């Protein structure tokens, strides 16, 4: 971990002031911005890319900027959710998802609809193509727009854009700068290994993937 953790006030996507926190994780620093009502963003530190990616599975998830005991319920939820994810993603079925502010809007808009559908219906160990996700929001012609929504996702891992793939390959993650990280996340979610076998193919169409049992997030807002 090479970046400095900071703790400062920061405007969030919901328009309310939020505070930025920093957690340690097996992947490196995770920066979170949240207000008392929910998450504004959850992002792997911007300095991490394929060139310097050096995961350490022995690293515990810890809040580095403050005393966890004094934090809001949202931050405590994030801590517990991330701990569970990195220890055993299968156990997320029993773990409440931290509140996400943009999911609480009366009108989600296209982006919110895509993100919430992804978080609610594509669970650990599953993958979905851009086209299938577009169809899942009843807008099958919006494949490119779904791809754009993935690039604009502010709540990585919890809103799992790493589980969205192309029909003929893995697809770009953070414009191709974090392919190793995407692969690490998918492999970490053990059940996805079978679906990942075709990603090693040099070219050509992948085999038909089995349709997974729809994931139901334990926290639907």
Image (tube, helix red, strand yellow):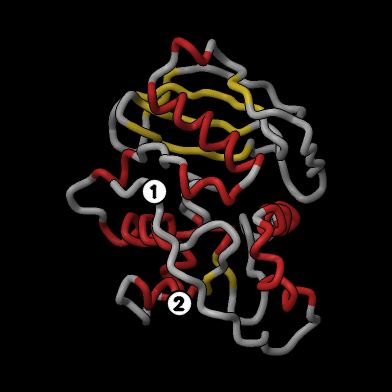
Classify 144 as above or below 163.
Answer: below
Q: Quadrant of residue 25?
A: top right
Task: Say which mark, if any, is on residue 155.
Answer: none
**Residue found 41% across the figure and 69% down from its top:** 145
Q: Quadrant of residue 56?
A: top right
**Quadrant, the N terminus:** top right
Residue 4 percent coordinates (x, y): 68, 21
Classify 35 as above or below 210.
Answer: above
Residue extending furthest left?
A: 106
Left/right of residue 111 with respect to residue 27 in the rendered view:
left
Residue 6 percent coordinates (x, y): 58, 19
According to the picture, the residue beneath numbered tag 1 turns out to be 218
Task: Say which mark, if any, is on residue 132.
Answer: 2
**Whole-number angstrom distance, CA of label 2 to CA of label 1:** 22 Å
Residue 214 percent coordinates (x, y): 43, 68
**Residue found 55% across the figure and 40% down from its top:** 43
Crowd tier of the residue under label 2, counting other residues whose Cα lies within 10 Å: few below 14, some 14–19, many 20 or above = some
**Residue found 33% across the figure and 24% down from its top:** 36
Q: Which of marks 2 and 1 is nearer the N terminus?
A: 2
Residue closer to the observer: 153 or 59:
59
**Residue found 61% across the figure and 39% down from its top:** 44
Label 1 element class: loop
Query: Of discs 2 and 1, which sits in the foreground?
Result: 1
């Amino acid at each position: 971990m090479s970046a400095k953790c900071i703790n400062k006030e920061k405007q969030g996507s919901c328009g309310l002031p939020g505070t930025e926190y920093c957690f340690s994780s097996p992947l490196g620093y995770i920066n979170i911005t949240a207000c008392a009502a929910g998450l504004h963003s959850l992002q792997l530190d911007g300095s991490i890319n394929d060139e310097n990616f050096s995961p350490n599975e022995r690293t515990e998830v810890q809040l580095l900027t403050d005393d966890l005991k004094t934090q809001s319920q949202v931050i405590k939820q994030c801590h517990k959710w991330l701990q569970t994810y990195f220890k055993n993603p299968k156990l997320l079925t029993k773990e409440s998802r931290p509140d996400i502010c943009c999911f609480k809007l009366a009108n989600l808009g296209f982006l919110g609809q895509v993100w919430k559908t992804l978080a609610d219906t594509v669970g650990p160990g599953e993958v979905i193509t851009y086209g299938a996700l577009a169809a899942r929001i009843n807008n099958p012609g919006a494949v490119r727009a779904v791809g754009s929504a993935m690039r604009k996702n502010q709540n990585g891992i919890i809103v799992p854009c790493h589980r969205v793939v192309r029909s003929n390959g893995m697809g770009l993650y953070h414009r191709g700068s974090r392919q190793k990280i995407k692969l690490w996340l998918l492999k970490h979610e053990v059940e996805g290994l079978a679906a990942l076998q075709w990603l090693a193919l040099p070219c050509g169409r992948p085999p038909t993937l089995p349709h997974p049992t729809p994931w139901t997030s334990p926290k639907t807002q």
